């Protein structure tokens, strides 16, 4: 049976270099690349990274902006700011992510506490940017 509840399927981020972005998300954030080999071979227009079984982040090359014709003005979203994307993690993965980012000298905020989100107040959270300037929050609830 298929679960057809509403859920977040994917987020598309504009990036300068999708291969470098996928490398960052794999090595610094711990997300598995999807279709990276196919992208490098020119077989698909962008790679992605898997957040969980239900959700991926597409890494759309900025050079594709002029081909965004699904709605009038869609190409104008290139570089349009999104406040941030939040990743909710188990506590151990939260600590591992922070360690990996620190090892790679990725700037991060101090750890915050009791930040409100989809599941109530998170015990701890912090923010960091990817190499393209996209802002991420990492948090854990328990």
Image: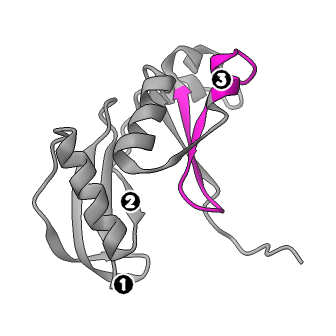
Q: Nearer the viewer, residue 55 or 6?
A: 55
Q: Are marks 1 and 2 in contact (CB under 8 Å)?
A: no
Q: Residue at x 53, y 56 (%)?
A: 51
For disc 3, the marked residue is 39
> Which element is circle 1 on?
strand
- Above or below 115: residue 28: above
Residue 53 lies within the magenta run? yes
Q: In the image, what residue occupies the spot 59% across and 29% down?
A: 74
**C-alpha distance separating marks 1 and 2:** 14 Å
Q: Earlier in the sequence, mark 1 or mark 3?
A: 3
Look at the image and tell me whether residue 11 can be seen.
Answer: yes
Q: CA distance from mark 1 to mark 3?
A: 38 Å
Q: Residue at x 13, y 54 (%)?
A: 109
Number of numbered discs on residues: 3
The stretch of residues the image draws in magenta is 37-60
Q: Alpha-carbon distance for marks 3 and 2?
A: 26 Å
- Mark 1 lies on residue: 120
């Amino acid at each position: 049976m298929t679960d057809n509840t509403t859920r977040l399927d994917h987020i598309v981020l504009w990036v300068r270099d999708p291969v470098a972005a996928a490398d960052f998300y794999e090595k610094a954030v711990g997300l598995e690349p999807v279709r990276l080999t196919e992208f490098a071979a020119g077989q698909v227009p962008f790679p992605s990274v898997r957040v969980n079984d239900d959700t991926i982040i597409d890494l759309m090359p900025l050079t594709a902006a002029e081909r965004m014709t699904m709605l009038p003005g869609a190409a104008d979203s290139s570089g349009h700011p999104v406040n941030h994307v939040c990743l909710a993690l188990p506590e151990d993965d939260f600590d591992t992510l922070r360690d990996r980012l620190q090892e790679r000298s990725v700037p991060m905020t101090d750890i915050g506490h009791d930040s409100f989100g989809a599941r109530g107040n998170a015990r701890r959270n912090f923010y960091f940017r990817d190499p393209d300037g996209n802002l991420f929050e990492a948090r854990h609830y328990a």
